[in-house]
Amino acid sequence: SRLHTSLLKIKSQLQIPDEAVPSRPGAVPVLSGPCAQPPFIPPQGTRDHHPAQMTLLGRLLGTVVSCFKRHGAAAIDTPVMELREMLMEKYGDNSKLIYELQDQGGELLALRYDLTVPFARYLAMNKITNIKRYHIAKVYRRDSPAMTRGRYREFYQCDFDIAGQFDPMIPDAECLKIVHEILSELQIGDFLIKVNDRRILNGMFAICGIPESKLVTMCSTLDKLDKMPWEEVRSEMVGEKGLSPEAVDRVGEYVQLHGGMDLIEQLLQDPKLSQNKMAKEGLEDMKLLFEYLTLFGITGKVSFDLSLARGLDYYTGVIYEAVLLQQQNNHGEESVGVGSVAGGGRYDGLVGMFDPKGRKVPCVGVSIGIERIFSILEHRMKASREKVRTTETQVMVATPQKHLLSARLKLISELWDAGIKAEMMYRKDPKLLKQLQYCEDTGIPLVAIIGEEELKDGVVKLRDVATREEVNIPREELAAEIRRRLEP
């Protein structure tokens, strides 16, 4: 078999032991040692994308980019690798998930973990104090992959950020509006945007008796509340983090609260929380944020949730995360659990870490979880058996008789030069039926047929693949006629 032959070639090239290659075609290879994983599959937590998947991904990214541009963002790009020192200690407990690279010519490098820290480095290096940017690129995390739920080690992030000194909560409210617009337009199901503020969290921890040295680790643990019940999170805080049960129980009274403007007003009257300066500032900004969200008309999808922590070190103010509540079930498919589909927050101190003089640039942003959303759309596409067209070809140039290759080449060249997306079969004398069948299989809507009769009359026979109607068009008018028929 071809597989067996391929294995023998790989064996000789990579010096794989004889016992690793099956003796008969069809047997399963058993590899051990450094070659325990066959070299012809993608690494764990990564995937190839087929044409149909890339078409779906392109549509998805197009929706996201269109929204970012609608809000006035400009695109940037940064290297896929950064100096290791720059990335470490920016992500709390998640720093252990950074992919470190071997020493290359004296530089200790690592693959980027997200797009936010490189953006902060970009701002500091270029002395930029005001920008609204978006960035779509792949990031890398040495995580335990759960590919059926859209969790990978290599995946796209789609970030929108506003950097600059502005009045409180106006840029923050716009970021939440962007999340609402994108998730609504994609129609992936009912969603909720949870919001909180790091200042409220830190103030709450302080009045509950949590030591300041434990704040970062507390946020990382609290972040698990969307996956674990409070009892398990409490056990981890007491057992693994060494916090007193009394302090943790006081935290538990707060973190199980969620609501809207009523809850904000209630906490502003809380005798302990309102006395903490950080918490009070956070609550006053949260009230202002909800006033702006009311004007945007999106408070029905937003919840002030005191359990939301987001475990990254660099957040300093408002934080938010969008989660799906349930899946639409139009096609009878099983629901797909994918966790959060967007998240972000304010990080006013991050840029200053990279500036030689420590100059701060306030920033707020959001990241759309494109891979998780893609998993839902892909699952829905498979369940509905929807056929995805993977090319944009407008017309197939075909011939009905032999010895007309030169006529096809001339006509297709004219169409390409006119900006028409056209294809032809790579055979000298293809059968007309095969050419027409190719159009039906690939979704090409029109066929331009040029035979001996058409050459003599100076016309081209234009066939509609769906209706099978044919009409002769003067050759010089063909490109215009194709455009007219395919106008949206």
Image: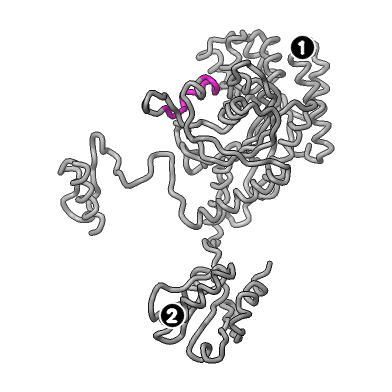
Q: Amino acid at mark 2?
A: Ser
Report the magenta residues as a range.
Answer: 89-100
- What residue does disc 2 label? 406
Identify the image quadrant of the C terminus: bottom right
Measuring 78% from the left and 21% from the top, which residue is drawn there? 283
Check whether the beta carbons of the residues at disc 2 and disc 1 lie within 8 A of each other: no
The residue closer to the viewer here, 399 or 308, is 399
Asked whether, in this view, residue 121 is left or right of residue 264, the answer is left
Coordinates of residue 433 in the picture (x, y in percent): 45, 81
Asked whether, in this view, residue 282 is left or right of residue 236, the answer is right
Coordinates of residue 264 in the picture (x, y in percent): 80, 24
What kind of element bears circle 1? helix
Coordinates of residue 438 in the picture (x, y in percent): 47, 73
Identify the image quadrant of the N terminus: bottom left
The residue closer to the viewer here, 416 or 232, is 416
Position above or below: 289 against 85: below
Q: Is residue 191 magenta?
A: no
Q: Amino acid at mark 1?
A: Lys
Measuring 75% from the left and 20% from the top, which residue is drawn there? 282
Is residue 225 visible in the rendered image? The answer is no
Residues packed near mark 2 inside 10 Å, few (<14), some (14 to 19) or many (20 plus): few
Number of numbered labels in the structure image:
2
- What residue does disc 1 label? 277
- C-alpha distance separating marks 2 and 1: 81 Å
What kind of element bears circle 2? helix
Coordinates of residue 205 in the picture (x, y in percent): 66, 13
Residues packed near mark 1 inside 10 Å, few (<14), some (14 to 19) or many (20 plus): few
